[in-house]
Image (cartoon, rainbow, N blue to C red):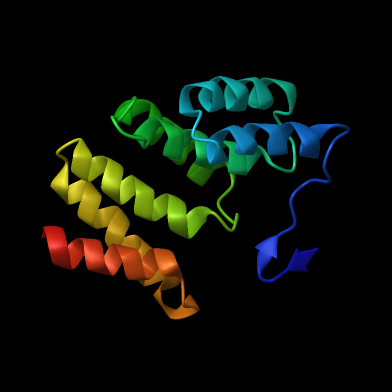
Amino acid sequence: KQSNGWADPAPAQEGEYQAYRACYDLVKRKKFDEAIVAFKQFQTDFPEGRYSANSYYWLGELYLTPPPRDIELARQSFTFLLERYPNHNKVPDTLYKLGKVHFLKGDMSKSQEYLQRVIREHGSTDSSAAKLAQAFLQDKF
């Protein structure tokens, strides 16, 4: 079944939505270290859940919050999302974030590769990630 061109995720499991909201609430309250722990627990509790891809995205984001807590773990979270959920609606943002992560790691060619991929694959969809990638390329390269 398709909706909006993205594969529908699995139905939410019992208690999953509430657990996800609790994790995300920590992000909104800027309790980043607590949110990292909560999202990791969420992934243990709901490994195949409807919000699993989102949890990897937010973990990647959290690992990048200043001061960057762990750029390599951010890369791993974003890469896992991309490999495991290639049709998820977070893919454009994830590609953009991977471009930024590789820039931070000093791998300029890998950075450009991800940024150009966002533009190539999502530039015609009015994706904000594609616009951000274009701006990042113009600003940094």
Q: Residue at x 23, y 47 (%)?
A: 110
Q: Is residue 7 above or below residue 36?
A: below
Q: Nearer the viewer, residue 88 or 26?
A: 26
Q: Residue at x 58, y 58 (%)?
A: 89
Q: Is residue 94 above or below residue 118?
A: above
Q: Residue at x 24, y 42 (%)?
A: 102
Give how far across and how far down residue 126 sits, in percent: 46, 77
Residue extending farthest right: 14
Residue 51 found in image quarter: top right
Q: Nearer the viewer, residue 50 or 59?
A: 59
Residue extending farthest left: 141
Q: Quadrant of the C terminus?
A: bottom left
Q: Quadrant of the N terminus?
A: bottom right
- Report whether 57 appears left or right of 74: right
Give how far across and how far down residue 76 sits, in percent: 41, 31
Residue 128 found in image quarter: bottom left
Q: Is residue 126 above or below residue 104?
A: below
- Report whether 42 appears left or right of 2: left
Q: Residue at x 21, y 39 (%)?
A: 104
Give how far across and how far down residue 107 sits, in percent: 17, 41
